[in-house]
Amino acid sequence: GAVVSQHPSWVICKSGTSVKIECRSLDFQATTMFWYRQFPKQSLMLMATSNEGSKATYEQGVEKDKFLINHASLTLSTLTVTSAHPEDSSFYICSAVEGVWEQYFGPGTRLTVT
Amino acid sequence: QKEVEQNSGPLSVPEGAIASLNCTYSDRGSQSFFWYRQYSGKSPELIMSIYSNGDKEDGRFTAQLNKASQYVSLLIRDSQPSDSATYLCAVKSGGGADGLTFGKGTHLIIQP
C-alpha cells in the first residue's frame, strides 16, 4: 500500500515555457500532499503544502505565482512551473500523507530547463 | 528556523557490521521523526518512524529517540552492500498538515 506516482519522470523544456507535473496517490486518499525540491547534493526542501479543495500554502521564499499548485481531488495534485528558467532545473518530488503522520514519496520528476 | 543536522560522511562500514547514523534537531516542539533512505537519482524511501523516547526496532533497523537531547539515531545491523545509500533524517512538528524538515543526509558505504 501507500503508493504515490508522479508524471512525467523527467522533462526537458525551453526557457520561458511552462511545465505541469502530476502527483497521484494510487491506493489511498490524501487530503494533504506536499511538494519538495532537491538540487544536486542538497537535501529536500519543502516548497508547499497542497490541501484538497483549498489554496496551497507556500514556504517562505517560494514564489506562488511561479509554482502553481492545484489539488483538485483526494488523489491528485499538480505542480505547474510557469515561465521556467534554467535555475528552476531540479528534482521535484511530491509526497502524500496516509493516516496522520507518515509521508510517502513519489518517484520524482527531473526537470531540465534549457 | 527549524534545522536538522547530520554528518554528511561518507561513513564507511564493513559488511556485516553495525552502521550507526546520527541526527540532531533544533525545534523542541518536534513530535515525529523519520529516517528515509535515498539512492542516487531516486526519491526517498521511508525506513523507520519514531514518535516517543526510546528504541524502536524493525528487522535490522533500530531507531532511537532522545527528545531531551534533541537527538535521533538509526542503527543498521548486519549491514549489507545494498544498504549503501544516503540516509535522510526528517522531523515534523505537528500532524499530517505539516511538511518535513530534512537533514542533508549521511552517505553510507558498506564495504564488501
Image: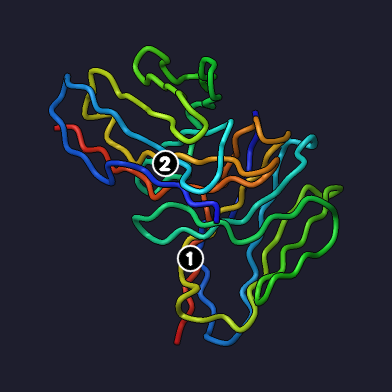
Q: Nearer the viewer, mark 1 or mark 2?
A: 2
Label 2 element class: strand
Residue nearer the viewer, A16 or B67:
A16
The chosen color scheme is rainbow
Label 1 element class: loop
Whether callout 1 and callout 2 share a subunit is answered no
Label 1: how many Cα within 10 Å (few below 14, some 14–19, many 20+): few
Task: For the C terminus of chain B, give its image quadrant.
Answer: bottom left
Residue occupying the point 51% across, 57% down: B45
In this figure, which residue is indicated by the disc labeled 2?
A93
In this figure, which residue is indicated by the disc labeled 1?
B10
Q: Position of residue A111 (x, y in %)?
A: 26, 38
Subunit ID for the residue under disc 2: A
Residue occupying the point 52% across, 54% down: B105
Residue occupying the point 77% across, 65% down: B56
Residue nearer the viewer, A94 or A51:
A51
Q: Position of residue A16 (x, y in %)?
A: 17, 19
Residue nearer the viewer, A3 or B51:
A3
Label 2: how many Cα within 10 Å (few below 14, some 14–19, many 20+): many
Residue nearer the viewer, A97 or B51:
A97
Q: Are marks 1 and 2 in contact (CB under 8 Å)?
A: no
> Picture quarter containing residue B4?
top right
User: In the image, is residue B80 above or below residue B85?
Assistant: below
Q: CA distance from mark 1 to mark 2?
A: 24 Å
